[in-house]
Image (cartoon, rainbow, N blue to C red):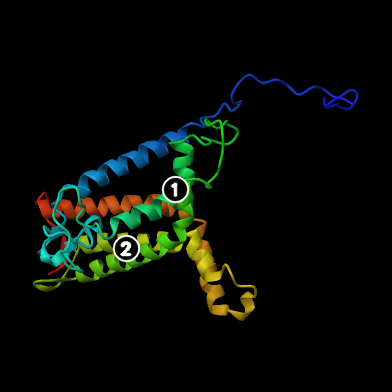
């Protein structure tokens, strides 16, 4: 008996296709846009994080999320909620207490994994397009083994969202008393979007209702689970929206702090 596979009489042999893919649409467009978008955001964020200036507006208590909370000894007092206990070396971000956890939360996010696996690593770049790698080990080896820590980075991201919320609240209380301007709107929109992205996380959905066997016995948690599930299907959109709101908020605070234009005030 031979090992050669047999086929039914009259059946055709499988076609030999020399092309890597038969797709004729612009399958490469989505990975390309992802590379451009993420690269541009990372470049902007990196420059801003290490500028060490134009992050705080004393007159209105506007603090950019890229510097919240400020913990190096170069930080101004109003931007330092937890003290200034790190040396002001240029290589140390002023928000070194929070930025690493936010970066890890985004890097291990289920959507962002798909985004940079497909666009930067071409693994695979699109459906029906072959992987550019000869072997596949999944997320069972270093450094991808660290993706399993995403659920813990979620807790850190939730705490940081609370800090950003506190920043937005404090911005209504300037040295001259209560005030409300366009900067407050920008900060509030950013905080709302950050919360929507954070709680739409798959880990949050599992924490709320993933282990329940009988939803009927937990009506409150079921209601919360359905709300989070509604957001969860929009997790990809929220991931990109929050990149935009973060950059916009930072740019607005930077522009006002640098004196490029004045904040539009509605009250005081």
Q: Secondary structure at mark 2?
A: helix
* Depth check, front residue: 50 or 90: 90
| Mark 1 or 2: the one toward you | 1
* Depth check, front residue: 172 or 204: 204
Q: Is residue 170 above or below residue 137?
A: below
Q: CA distance from mark 1 to mark 2?
A: 20 Å
Q: Is residue 209 visible?
A: yes
Q: Is residue 136 left or right of residue 117?
A: right
Q: What x and y, as percent, mark residue 178?
A: 15, 74
Q: Is residue 144 above or below residue 100?
A: above
Q: Quadrant of the N terminus?
A: top right
* Tally of marks: 2
For residue 96, which quarter of the picture?
Answer: bottom left
Q: Residue at x 48, y 50 (%)?
A: 145
Q: Residue at x 31, y 44 (%)?
A: 41
Mark 1 is surrounded, within 10 Å at the Cα level, by few (under 14), some (14 to 19) or many (20 or more) other residues, namely: some
Q: What x and y, as percent, mark residue 247?
A: 27, 50
State yes or no: discs 1 and 2 in contact (Cβ < 8 Å).
Answer: no
Q: Is residue 62 left or right of residue 143?
A: left
State the residue position of label 2. 191
Q: Residue at x 8, y 72 (%)?
A: 176
Q: Residue at x 20, y 70 (%)?
A: 170
Q: Earlier in the sequence, mark 1 or mark 2?
A: 1
Q: Is residue 215 left or right of residue 181?
A: right
* Depth check, front residue: 234 or 7: 7
Q: What x and y, as percent, mark residue 260?
A: 11, 49
Q: Secondary structure at mark 1?
A: helix
Q: Which mark is residue 112?
A: 1
Q: Which mark is residue 126?
A: none
């Amino acid at each position: 008996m031979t090992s050669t596979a047999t086929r039914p009489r009259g059946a055709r042999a499988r076609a030999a296709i020399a092309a890597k893919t038969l797709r004729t649409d612009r399958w490469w467009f989505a990975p390309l846009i992802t590379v451009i978008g993420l690269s541009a955001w990372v470049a902007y964020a990196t420059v801003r994080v290490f500028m060490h200036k134009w992050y705080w507006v004393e007159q209105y208590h506007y603090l950019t999320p890229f510097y919240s909370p400020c913990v190096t000894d170069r930080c101004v007092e109003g931007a330092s909620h937890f003290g200034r206990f790190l040396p002001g070396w240029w290589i140390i971000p002023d928000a070194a207490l929070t930025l690493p956890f936010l970066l890890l939360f985004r890097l291990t996010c289920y959507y962002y994994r798909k985004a940079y696996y497909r666009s930067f690593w071409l693994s695979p770049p699109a459906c029906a397009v072959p992987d550019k790698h000869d072997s596949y080990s999944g997320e069972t080896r270093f450094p991808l083994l660290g993706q399993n820590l995403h659920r813990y980075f979620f807790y850190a991201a939730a705490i940081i969202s609370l800090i950003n919320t506190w920043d937005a609240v404090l911005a209504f209380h300037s040295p001259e008393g209560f005030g409300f301007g366009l900067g407050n709107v920008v900060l509030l929109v950013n905080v709302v979007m950050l919360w929507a992205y954070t709680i739409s996380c798959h880990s949050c959905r599992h924490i709320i209702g993933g282990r329940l066997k009988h939803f009927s016995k937990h009506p409150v948690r079921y209601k919360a689970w359905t709300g989070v599930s509604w957001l969860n299907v929009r997790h990809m959109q929220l991931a990109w929206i929050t990149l935009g709101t973060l950059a916009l908020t930072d740019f607005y605070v930077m522009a006002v702090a640098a004196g490029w234009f004045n904040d539009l005030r509605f009250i005081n």
